[in-house]
Image: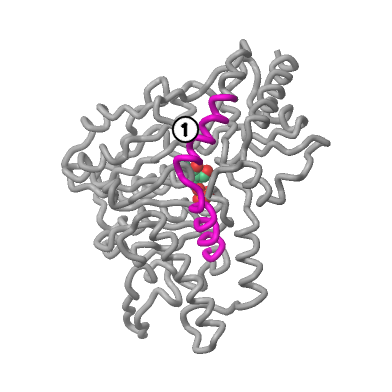
Amino acid sequence: MTFDVEAIRAQFPILNRDINEQPLAYLDNAASAQKPLAVIDAMKSQMETSYANVHRGLHTMANETTAAYEGARQTVADFLGAPKVDNIVFTRGATEALNLVAYGLMEEIEAGDEIIISQMEHHSNIVPWHFLRERKGAVIRFVPVLDNGVLDTDALKSMLSAKTKVVSLVHMSNVLGTINPIKTIAPWVKSTGAVFVVDGTQAAVHMPINVQDLGVDFFCMTGHKLYGPTAIGALYGSLEMLNRLQPFNGGGEMIEDVFEDRVTYNDAPHKFEAGTPPILEAIGLGAAIKWYRQYDPADIHQHEMAVYYHALDGLRDINSFRLVGDAPEKGSVLSFNLEGAHAHDVAQILDKYGVAVRAGQHCTQPLMTRLGIHSTARASFGIYNTLDEADRLIAAVKKAAHFLS
Ligand SMILES: Cc1ncc(COP(=O)(O)O)c(C=O)c1O
């Protein structure tokens, strides 16, 4: 489908609303994106026409709902380039996917084993590994981030050793926008025999993903940033790796047989989906991916980066403006500070002009410490943002700079 931003915007009813008597400029997509009618309608229509619990039914609607739920799994598998539908585990989001992997590997980890992550990780790719440090004596090592927001891959290379058991890295930073060279890193990790986990939460929204081409063992994504519903995400794992993981939650559906003295487990991915899953949310995620895939990823990228650079050009005219994250390979995330002003105050002033941005530490406290800053304001651009909205951001930040200086 040709890329027509106004035609895309028309599919998002919420973008028509006003905020503080100004038209909404929604620039908080890295936190969560808005939903197109295709997603809203898919979930509504499922509830209105065919809804039941999945898998265990012998009646028509149970079978129809199961087909829709499993169809969504196939859609995710295709989207990520997974070889089989069974490579995809539905989770509540990226956070749960990363916890699932860390928990699943817990028994393999011994005191002194090393887990390598980076200074630009989201807390959801830090805290689950701290559990392994606390409970098993694992050592967490952080790959440094250079001043411009690039991952120090030379340092990463030198940190890898026979002690490395897991390497878990973000594909695209939610603060810096940096895109890490996952495909280059994968063979380095593989040569140590370590498990390679990739947090693709932001990347999956901004670039085509092929997990086989990337050469990763695990890759996670989340629905709500990809124009889909909340409380649904997915974990890709090679079948060998999924079979290596211990189950995360226990309950119905994840078992094969349960006896008084023992239990046997279902195969992956069902082994990791205990209880009634987020059925409608999975169907909504499938609808979001199908909707998104109508557009050429190159067109989406070009459009988002045009809006990003337009905003950046204008913001650079402001004396107190400081960009945070200037990697040559980056996506449409624009983190910044106004010297002498708190990012929260900046965001609150922007809201008065209808411009929605996020401000704070963005769940990346070690990154803030590394950069020597407390927080940032962050404008993050998605498929429906416009050059006009970038202009409104610039104008509102100018007002904030004037007001707060
Ligand atoms: C890079 C990154 N990883 C993980 C997450 C966690 O995603 P979720 O809250 O959907 O589980 C986020 C959310 O902001 C993120 O930006």
Residue 66 horizontal/vertical position (percent): 49, 76
Q: Is residue 131 left or right of residue 39?
A: left
Q: Is residue 143 left or right of residue 59?
A: left
Residue 319 horizontal/vertical position (percent): 61, 10
Viewer-proximal residue among 95 and 70: 70
Residue 112 visible from this viewpoint:
no
Residue 22 horizontal/vertical position (percent): 79, 35
Viewer-proximal residue among 337 and 12: 12
Which residue is located at x 49 percent, y 89 percent? 58
Q: Quadrant of the C terminus?
A: top right
Taken as a whole, is the magenta stretch helix, strand or loop?
helix
Q: Measured along the vertical axis of the image, is residue 317 above or below residue 51? A: above
Which residue is located at x 50 percent, y 48 percent? 295
> Which residue position is annotated with label 1?
177
Q: Badge 1: few (under 14), some or many (20 or more) residues near its Cα, within 10 Å? A: many
Q: How many numbered discs sit on the rendered protein?
A: 1
Range of residues picked out in magenta: 282-310
Determine the residue located farthest toward the bottom in the rendered image: 58
Q: Is 248 a magenta residue?
A: no
Q: Is residue 352 left or right of residue 388?
A: right
Q: Secondary structure at mark 1?
A: loop
Q: Quadrant of residue 366?
A: top left
Q: Quadrant of residue 270?
A: bottom left
Q: Amino acid at mark 1?
A: Gly
Q: Is 283 a magenta residue?
A: yes
Which residue is located at x 63 percent, y 53 percent? 36
Viewer-proximal residue among 196 and 207: 207
Residue 110 horizontal/vertical position (percent): 24, 50
Instruction: Indicate if the residue with disc 1 has its beta carbon within 8 Å of ligand 1.
Output: no
